[in-house]
Amino acid sequence: MRPNCSAMRMPTEGKEMLAARGALLCVADAGLADQLTRELKLCAHVGAVSVAASLPASIERMAQDSPCAILLDDGFLQGAPLPEVLRQLTKTAAAVLIAAAERQSEILRMVAEGEVEFVARRGEFTSLE
């Protein structure tokens, strides 16, 4: 069989750039942050994974790292208004919120418009399996 001479090589610059930007975990629970970091590092296309345990720390990490994805645990908010925090975070990166199912109504419009992905928490933990 003859190789396909018309096949073109696709540049990987975009993939490398996204991987270099990495992910930001906005998680107040240190144990959950460690577990999520370990799981993400097993993925081949994830670059640097940074963790912020508070809102001011997340703003600082976003400015330094310019992540391509943000995972936000609602326990991280410590009373801050969810829609406002998400609007701020989604200006620079795609965001995924982990929260109790009841919290989805607070950001329903953002989810419907594709600005935020929502993952419902079940019980006391978020299953990684």
Image (tube, grey):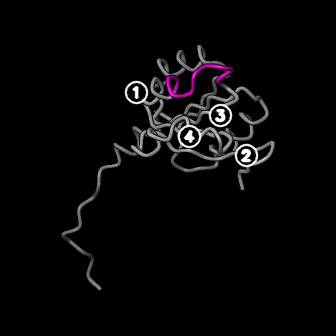
Residue at 49% from the left image edge and 18% from the top image edge: 64
Which of the 4 image quarters holds residue 97? Answer: top right
Q: Earlier in the sequence, mark 1 or mark 2?
A: 1
State the CA–CA distance, disc 3 to disc 4: 16 Å
Residue behind mark 1: 91
Residue behind mark 4: 105
Nearer to us in this view, 71 or 100: 100
| Magenta-colored span | 77-85
Crowding at mark 2 (Cα within 10 Å: few <14, some 14-19, many 20+): some
Nearer to us in this view, 82 or 13: 82
Q: Secondary structure at mark 4?
A: helix
Q: Amino acid at mark 1?
A: Lys
Q: Say whether residue 32 is left or right of residue 84.
A: right
Q: Earlier in the sequence, mark 2 or mark 3?
A: 3
Q: Secondary structure at mark 3?
A: strand
Q: Are marks 4 and 1 in contact (CB under 8 Å)?
A: no
Q: Earlier in the sequence, mark 4 or mark 2?
A: 4
Q: Earlier in the sequence, mark 4 or mark 1?
A: 1
Q: Locate the N terminus and report the quarter of the image it occupies.
A: bottom left
Q: Is residue 113 above or below residue 6?
A: above
